[in-house]
Amino acid sequence: MNDAAIVDLARNALLMAVTLAAPMLLVALVVGLLVSIVQAVTQIQEQTLAFVPKLLAVAMVFLIGLPWMIQTAGKYTTELLRSIPALAH
């Protein structure tokens, strides 16, 4: 296995991790920003007010996106396992 193959495997793994995590991270970012704006406008500085909506939104996106995430991770794993013989040469 040469250096280019190792770098390619690492790049693909990182890209897969970002692809799977991005929807939940973006929802957490948007919900956190909206809650922060509401807290700034109303001057309510309660920590649970910032945490609970983000937790619920991320959980909802996770449950909705779980079939897609499993399918994407399954395809990646299948391709990775099929490429092992080619990497051995």
Image (cartoon, rainbow, N blue to C red):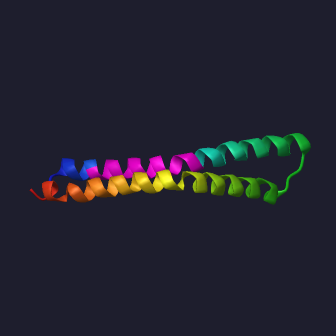
The quarter of the image holding the C terminus is bottom left
Q: Is residue 15 left or right of residue 3?
A: right
Q: Any magenta on residue 19?
A: yes
Quadrant location of the N terminus in the rendered image: bottom left
Q: Is residue 4 magenta?
A: no
In the displayed orientation, state which residue is furthest to the left.
Answer: 89
Q: Is residue 61 above or below residue 34?
A: below
Q: Provide the major secondary structure of the magenta segment.
A: helix
Could one spot residue 1 in this view of the protein?
no
The image shows residue 50 at horizontal and vertical percentages of 77, 53
Left/right placement of residue 81 relative to residue 66 reads left
Q: Position of residue 9 (x, y in %)?
A: 28, 52
Residue at screen point 60% across, 44% down: 26
Q: For residue 54, say whether it is visible.
A: yes
Residue found 69% across the figure and 57% down from its top: 55
Residue 46: name its quadrant.
bottom right
The answer to which of 67 and 35 lies nearer the viewer is: 67
Q: Position of residue 5 (x, y in %)?
A: 20, 50
How far across and how far down the image is residue 62, in percent?
A: 58, 55
* Extent of the magenta region: 9-24
**Which residue lies at the image location 42% right of the left edge and 53% below the top edge?**
71
